[in-house]
Image: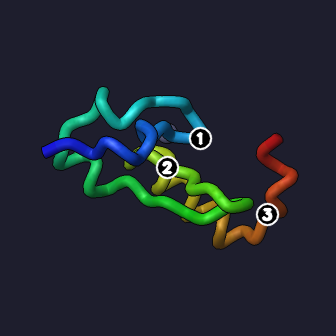
Amino acid sequence: MTAGSSPVATCFRCGVSRSSVSDLEFLAWSSERAGGGVRWLCQVCSKAHVRDIEGKLPDEYWR
Ligand SMILES: [Zn+2]
């Protein structure tokens, strides 16, 4: 199975690429729409990011 049209997913927080994790781990990745694109979060950063969302931190915090 190939996904020719979609770019390789990369965690926007820590930079790990989808190809470096197992399919099972990738199931735990989350994506969010941002400015016409999609940002991916790996399974580790997703957990951390949930806490951030709960804290209602502004997006500028991550620059
Ligand atoms: Zn990550």
Q: Earlier in the sequence, mark 3 or mark 1?
A: 1
Looking at the rendered structure, the secondary structure element under dot 2 is strand
Q: Position of residue 38 (x, y in %)?
A: 57, 56
Name the residue that disc number 3 marks: 57
Relative to 60, 55 lies left or right: left
Q: Is mark 2 within 8 Å of ligand 1?
A: yes
Residue type at tag 1: Phe
**Mark 3 secondary-structure assignment:** loop
Measuring from the top left, give residue 15's x and y in whole percent. Answer: 53, 30
Instruction: Answer few, some or many: residues within 10 Å of disc 2's Cα (few below 14, many 20 plus, some between 14 and 19).
Output: many
Q: Which numbered disc flags the more N-terminal residue, 3 or 2?
A: 2
Whether ligand 1 has any atom under 8 Å from the Cβ at mark 1 is answered as yes
* Residue located 41% across and 47% down the image: 6
How many residues crowd mark 3 within 10 Å: few (<14), some (14–19), many (20+)?
Answer: few
Question: Quadrant of the image for the N terminus?
Answer: top left
Circles 2 and 1, Cβ within 8 Å, touching? The answer is yes
The crowd level at tag 1 (other Cα within 10 Å; few <14, some 14-19, many 20+) is some
- Indicate the position of residue 3 as horizontal and vertical percent values: 28, 45
Decide if residue 45 is on the left or right side of residue 12.
left
List the residue tagged with mark 1: 12
Specify the farthest residue to the front: 5
Instruction: Find residue 41 and name its label.
Output: 2
Q: Which is nearer the eye, 11 or 46?
A: 11
Which quadrant: the C terminus? top right
Give residue 54's quadrant in the image. bottom right
Q: Amino acid at mark 2?
A: Leu
Query: Label 1's element?
Result: loop
